[in-house]
Amino acid sequence: MPGFELFGEEERKEVNDVLETGILMRYGFDGPRKGIWKAKELEQAITEVFGCSYAQLTSSGTSALTTAMAALGIGAGDEVIMPSFTFVASFEAVLSVGAVPVLVDIDETLTLDPDAVRAAITPKTKCVMPVHMCGSMADLDALQQICREFSLILLEDACQSIGASYKGRMLGTIGDAGTFSFDFVKTITCAEGGVVMTNSKDIYSKSDGYTDHGHDHAGVDRGADLHPFIGFNYRISELHAAVGLAQIRKLSTFLEIQKKNNLLLRSYLEQIPEVSFRKVPEGGVDSYSFLSWFLPDETLTRAFVEEMKTQGILAGNFYWFVNNWHYISKWDHLKQAKTLNALSEVQKQAILQLGQTSFPASDAIMSRCISTAISLVWTEEQIRDKGEKMAKAIQKVLLANRQNA
Ligand SMILES: *Cc1c(COP(=O)(O)O)cnc(C)c1O
């Protein structure tokens, strides 16, 4: 799954180019940088590899989401519909621009259920934000239809699905804007970094200014730039961009390995009739970074997790429902509105309300779901061993369950 597993000579070479000039910042210093522009080069590569008109690098995936929302004009009191299963960064970004996260149920795609989105629309809804979790996607046709019907913005959080596609287009390039994260555990990494992708020149140039204190970047003299609006500092450094440049050149190799390893592991679980798999919408191509699968019920799933723990082989199998920081059941800090600075009353009331809201449809899915992270460095022998052990553990809990019945 993560690019850091195959870090080497190529990354060192790119970083060294930057260290040779000593110009670690992405803007200015045109003379001393001797033609080295890693961030610009990476942005260009992103537009080519993923097929979008514009790319703006940022300091993280979280700041990419914040930047995209600001550039899309999402702000005070606007409601952003997002899934109950995601990484905390998704709602952090919504809150950071003064907007209100409206969490709704997921379906077996592991992201937004279009019917749940429709039911959550109010006059304040401004944006629908699918989060393409664990390498695969939401039903984007259905969501685009809803956005057209109600004049809503579609913002894709594709941070976890670099390289997956839907009907021939790469995830993150389909909505009004989309984001990737290049943090240390993502499919390709910059150590820390992110990107806003869009086909709109306006959204791009706003993103460009917003990530650099509102600079218009119109002239050659940075000191003489105008500031048409207020921005922040969400810049990426040349050192980080250099790592990303080496990584993006290896992306197709990473994706090939992921697919091969994922399908081999899957072949072991497919032999068990009680196991089913995450739904990939028609026309979608998974990035294969995770194998996400279901057991028939929560009891069996918990028993499987216990069995794997007992055998000391649970690592890499994520039971998001209880173990991790990706599902609403674990977001007490959000539900209790624990912020350091005061939120607006509208935001505060909305997130306190989440503590009183139940998500039975999401629970019914997440309580049966395991995501197995796919490593780039597994040998075939290791995958076969893993597949056999997982299949045995599943058979064991199924048998025990039948005997108890
Ligand atoms: C990783 C991630 C982010 C944010 O990324 P950072 O670069 O760590 O800030 C946002 N959304 C999702 C779904 C993620 O997995």
Image: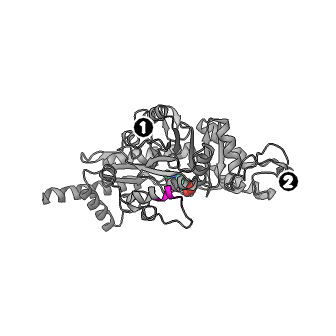
Q: Position of residue 206 (x, y in %)?
A: 68, 43
Q: Position of residue 63 (x, y in %)?
A: 60, 53
Q: How is the image coloured?
A: one colour
On the question of residue 330 being in view, the answer is yes
Q: Nearer the viewer, residue 182 or 263?
A: 182
Residue drawn at x 43%, y 65% as measured from the top left: 336
On the question of residue 249 being in view, the answer is no
| Helix, strand or loop under label 1 | loop
**What amino acid type is highlighted by mark number 1?**
Asp
- The answer to if 346 sits in the magenta stretch is yes
Read off the residue under disc 1.
139
Is 54 drawn above or below residue 293 in the view shown?
Answer: above
Who comes first in sequence, dot 2 or dot 1? Answer: 2
Q: Nearer the viewer, residue 49 or 126?
A: 126
Q: For label 2, count other residues whose C-alpha is less than 10 Å away and answer few (under 14), some (14-19) or many (20+).
A: few
Residue drawn at x 53%, y 55% as measured from the top left: 95
Read off the residue under disc 2.
32
